[in-house]
Amino acid sequence: MVLDSTPFYAESGGQVGDEGVLESGSASFLVQDTQKIKADVFGHHGRLAHGTLNVGDHVNAKVDMKRRAATVRNHSATHLMHKALREVLGSHVQQKGSLVDSERTRFDFTHNAPLTPEQVREIEARVNAEILDNHATQARVMDIESAKATGAMMLFGEKYGESVRVLDIGSSRELCGGTHVQRTGDIGLFKVVGEGGVAAGVRRIEAVTGANALAYLQQLENTVQTVAGSLKTAPMELQGRVTQVLEQVRSLEKEVAQLKGKLASSQGDDLVSQAVDVKGIKVLAARLDGADAKALRDTMDKLKDKLKSAAIVLATVDGAKVQLAAGVTADSMGKVKAGDLVNFVAQQVGGKGGGKADMAMAGGTDASKLAGALSSVQGWVAERV
């Protein structure tokens, strides 16, 4: 729908187009976006909810003011954030893109490193200080040369006409044709919710304002309270409790590792009798339940010491995954290499691996074929000795 004049803001300068409704008698057209078709001609994109509209009809244009107000807060906050970024990070910061809607503001800028938590907090403090000062917003239309003389920020690479709009929001002065708050205090609250890289030398920062900022903080508070409840502590004591729990977890992990080592060692002692002599070399291929990679290596070393001259494959299973370790004693490495041996077994269980001549590790994804793979080790070694 195209009108001869409209209160709807068409998408421009990173600010999304307005939504709302166009009404005429019993007809109603739901506007879902507003776009510029050409200079001073705006297209209201949406769908006819009911009734009929014809060329020449008079309509009552109603902008969704709740959504517009939220967008306005985010747009004005973007100007203050841009200035704060330059003050905190340096004058090299330049806008590389933005998206402002009713949910949040997204701002891309030149910078070659992630923002530190301290820098984010300083940016938030500067923007919120401007909000608390409750400065009136001022917009002036003037020729481009007069605008330059005011020191207004201009976007690098942007093409401007002879007449431009200079916008003062707090201590920020930029060229902008978007919609804005009447006073900085109308923004309510500013909170950064994300920061990351989008390209080489370009960062992206996202923030929320007003009711969205309050909802974000309330959600964080709810999360903290839930976690604190799970750990049976007060929210203000959560950090100390988390530190305590992490220490307990590390202690338990260490204890579990020691127990696994003892279990694997005891199983290893029982495995010695299962080794088969193949032309003077003891060959052993066995499954070691409950072991991890370290337990496999430790048990391997003990078995090599006890068997003296040997080629050994040990395996452990976790679900469908298989972990393998192969070891060959020094006197046998001229005929059998641990890397070749473990790779031979790994290929049969959907994996691959390799390593040194005396010790090698591998993994696999098909535990169902492990028994057959281990039984083939004796024949493989026999062919090489």
Image: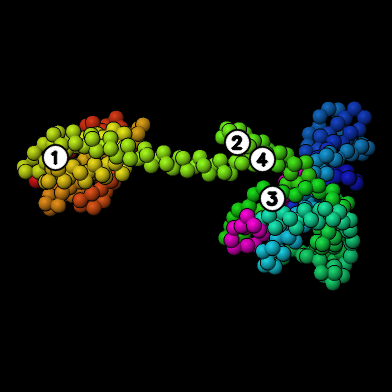
Q: Which residue is mark 3?
A: 192
Measuring from the top left, give residue 300's x and y in whole percent. 22, 43
Q: Residues within 10 Å of mark 2 (few under 14, many from 20)?
A: some
> How far, Cα to Cα, is label 3 from label 4?
13 Å
Question: Foreground: 62 or 194?
Answer: 194
> How far, Cα to Cα, is label 3 from label 1?
63 Å
Q: Which residue is mark 2?
A: 233
> How far, Cα to Cα, is label 2 from label 4?
17 Å
Q: Determine whether the residue tagged by mark 4 lies in a helix, strand or loop.
A: helix
Q: Residue at x 83, y 27 (%)?
A: 50
Left or right: 30 in relation to 365:
right
> On the rendered image, what quadrant is the N terminus found in?
top right
Assess whether residue 23 is covered by the magenta stretch. Answer: no
Image marks 2 and 4: residues in contact by CB distance under 8 Å: no
Assess whether residue 113 is covered by the magenta stretch. Answer: yes
Left or right: 54 in relation to 112:
right
Q: Disc 3 vs disc 2: which is toward the camera?
A: 2
Dot placed on the residue nearer the N-terminal end, 3 or 2: 3
Magenta residues, as a range? 98-119
Q: Residues within 10 Å of mark 4 (few under 14, many from 20)?
A: few
Measuring from the top left, give residue 220's x and y in whole percent. 66, 40
Dot placed on the residue nearer the N-terminal end, 3 or 1: 3
- The mark found on residue 283 in the picture is 1
Image marks 3 and 1: residues in contact by CB distance under 8 Å: no
The answer to whether residue 20 shows anywhere in this view is: yes
